[in-house]
Image (cartoon, helix red, strand yellow):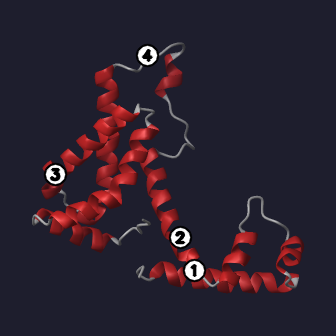
């Protein structure tokens, strides 16, 4: 089942409802943020059993500390940080890190590397975009699909593929992206 990311105000309301003891709200909260927690656990290269431990500990911390969360709409960032900390604690407890060679290599991280929680949040946003993309008219989907290919075709090649004049592709693309922006701003039915 595809879930879309609720707005910060929706998340804040969901967290508040959870704290009032609504079991269904907890189910929705856990269902929505499970991919985030699992992605972070897997990004630390833990075994499936260790990922499950981190997952459970992260949600235990949520139950314990959610009432103290100041910005309830920021629960995704809080869960990401908590999951990352639980992963690091788990790695430290299991003493799986055995540095070999030059320790300075281990002391630095790639400056351009995307942080696991940022990657998970980006993937959640990508799910929203894909959901909105699927609600576009088929002509817009086809046009954007061709123009957003990797590597992108030239406008001449895209025009041939779509059976459209080269000069019309830019304006059609702009209108399709405008419709996509409108769909992203609307709540999912």
SS category of the residue bearing label 2: helix
Which quadrant of the rendered structure holds the N terminus? Answer: bottom left
Marks 2/3: CA distance?
31 Å
Q: Position of residue 160 (x, y in %)?
A: 89, 76
Q: Secondary structure at mark 3?
A: helix
Q: Which numbered disc covers residue 7?
A: none
Which is in the foreground here, disc 3 or disc 4? 3
Label 2 sits on residue: 129
Q: Is residue 71 left or right of residue 84?
A: left
Q: Which mark is residue 180?
A: 1
- Read off the residue under disc 4: 98
Labels 1 and 2 touching (C-beta < 8 A): yes
- What is the distance, in whole Å, between disc 3 and disc 4 at their CAs? 33 Å
Q: Residue at x 57, y 44 (%)?
A: 112
Q: Earlier in the sequence, mark 1 or mark 4?
A: 4
Question: In x, y percent, where is residue 162?
Answer: 82, 78
Question: Which of the two labelled residues, at mark 1 and mark 2, occupies the earlier sequence position?
Answer: 2
């Amino acid at each position: 089942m595809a879930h879309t990311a609720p707005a910060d105000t929706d998340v804040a309301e969901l967290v508040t409802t959870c704290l009032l003891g609504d079991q269904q709200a907890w189910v929705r909260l856990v269902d929505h943020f499970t991919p985030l927690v699992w992605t972070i656990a897997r990004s630390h290269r833990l075994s499936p059993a260790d990922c499950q431990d981190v997952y459970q500990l992260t949600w235990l911390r949520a139950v314990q500390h959610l009432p103290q969360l100041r910005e309830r709409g920021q629960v995704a960032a809080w869960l990401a940080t908590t999951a990352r900390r639980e992963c690091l604690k788990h790695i430290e407890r299991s003493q799986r890190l055995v540095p070999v060679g030059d320790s300075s290599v281990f002391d630095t991280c790639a400056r351009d590397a995307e942080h696991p929680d940022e990657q998970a949040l980006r993937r959640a946003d990508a799910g929203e975009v894909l959901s909105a993309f699927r609600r576009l008219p088929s002509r817009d989907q086809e046009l954007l699909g061709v123009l957003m290919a990797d590597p992108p075709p030239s406008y001449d090649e895209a025009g041939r593929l779509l059976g459209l004049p080269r000069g019309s592709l830019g304006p059609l693309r702009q209108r399709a992206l405008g419709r996509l922006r409108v769909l992203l701003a609307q709540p999912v039915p």
